[in-house]
Image: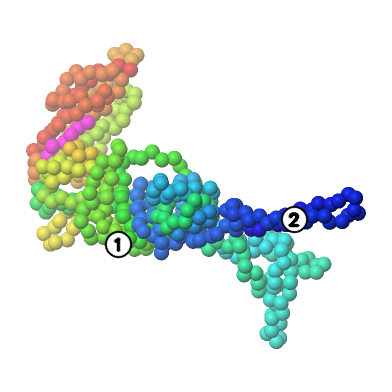
Amino acid sequence: MVKVILLFETDSKKPKSLIFFSLLILFLTSADLFPQKMITASLTDQKGIILTLYQDQGHIQEIREVQIPQGEIHINWINVASKIIPSSIVLFPASAKQNIQIKEQQYVFDLQNTETMLEKFIGKEIKIARKNPQTGEENIITAQLLSTQGGNIYKIGEDITFGDLGRIILPSAVQTLVTQPTISFLLRSTEKLKSPLTLSYFTLGLSWHTDYLLILASDERSLRLTGRAMLENQAGIAFKNAQIKLIAGEVHQAAHPASPLYRAALSAESVLEQSLPSVNPLFEYYQFSLPGRINLEIQEMKQVTLVEGNDIHFVKKFKLASPPQFYPGHISSASPGTSCEVILQIENKKENKLGMPLAKGLWRVYQSMESGHLDFLGEDELSQIPKDEKIEINVGKSFDVIAERTQTQYKRIKDNLYEMGYEIKLKNHKPQDAVVEVVETLNGSWKILSSSHAYLKIASDRVLFNIKIPKEKTVILTYSAELKY
């Protein structure tokens, strides 16, 4: 910008005669006075991208190389997730030594449709093409758009009219049109340079969960395990050649409002065949780093293998839990036959072909038949399991191992003191022996007075009986207890 300053000096003795005229031209080179330049950073500038997926959102770190001039410049960073959390946006140069200052940033998500475009012209003149129904020729008229609420209202000359007047024509040079989600930055640089910039942000619509497939051998002597992570992309953008990391653990995150993006149908899921990921501790969580680079398309669900194990040993056991009883009461009749739960117990240890952190997920159990096909046995949702801990999967309820429970004693000694006795018939109709874990709940202050089998106190209100039942036999468990409320 050039500023011209004119300096005048007059002689008071000579009427308004010009004695001296000086022209001073000042060249002001401050960047604030030059028109700000604008460039676009797109996927063609991308040098790398890392996706870190949590259970319900994703963290994006993307590097793009941008030519930055000296002074101020607007950078429009396009091709970003439409479900971005705007408050999480951070842009920083690759090196702290680069003197680049970020003065402003804004997230623009004002994608255009008929209504949003017309709203920009309320109070302004537009053109309308009206077709002559007889000749088919179009006549262009000028109208002022007054409103778009409940239909368009126009002012033509001195008249107000509304309705469909014809084809609307808008000026092509509209400065505020946005065709895709964009982050706009205003940067100042003390020098001209070509610099890698890293954009970091969180987005909704990126998530992952784990599905475990357990295949029981036909002879029921071993298991085969495959654990797969399901990656889901509903963030509104495809991620190409990305490095992907999965975070297993309960990371505390604040609630964020949903972004205004429609939820489209997911594409068919795909399975990515690759080597197993590396697993490393991250603070109080675990990070699964997937090998290689992965494409994650819009609305895609993709499976990647996390864990595999063959010839895994397990224990099949049966479990029976007493119904909750918060206050003592007399039960006059025996409960009908109750099926015992079937539990598969697996040691998550290295000696058992496992021994690694297992993210929470759904465990599906199948049995491999001699014919070669798989039969579904049941499924269970389990929380995260550290290494060297036990995995207990509730597969379903046994058809052949059942129990009948009868209250044999109910005595009220005084207002808050009772004696109660129970008989539990455990029936095994299988051609093999079975072991049933019977868990009884005793409320208040209690003590066992007598018992037909040994027991173990496992909690302040529960005792455990391990009862072995021979094949096709019945075993009767009896016990009495004193309860004080």
Q: Amino acid at mark 2?
A: Ser
Residue 286: name its quadrant. Answer: top left
Q: Position of residue 246 (x, y in %)?
A: 31, 48
Residue positioned 60% across, 58% down in the render: 35
Residue furthest to the top? 414
Residue positioned 35% across, 61% down in the render: 240
Q: Is residue 74 above or below residue 168?
A: above
| Magenta-drawn segment | 434-439
Q: Earlier in the sequence, mark 2 or mark 1?
A: 2
Q: Quadrant of the C terminus?
A: top left
Residue 331: name its quadrant. Answer: top left
Q: Position of residue 472 (x, y in %)?
A: 10, 41
Q: Is residue 200 visible?
A: no
Q: What secondary structure is the stretch in magenta mostly built from?
A: strand
Q: Nearer the viewer, residue 128 or 90?
A: 90
Q: Quadrant of the N terminus?
A: bottom right
In the shown orientation, is residue 126 left or right of residue 294?
right
Q: Amino acid at mark 1?
A: Ser
Does the stretch in magenta take in 462?
Answer: no
In the shown orientation, is residue 323 left or right of residue 136?
left
**Mark 2: secondary structure:** strand
Q: Nearer the viewer, residue 121 or 213?
A: 121
Query: Mark 2 highlights which residue?
Result: 22
**Mark 1: secondary structure:** strand
Within-10-Å neighbours for mark 2: few <14, some 14–19, many 20+: few
Within-10-Å neighbours for mark 1: few <14, some 14–19, many 20+: few
User: Which mark, residue 270?
Assistant: 1
Q: Position of residue 146 (x, y in %)?
A: 73, 62
Residue positioned 36% across, 59% down in the render: 47
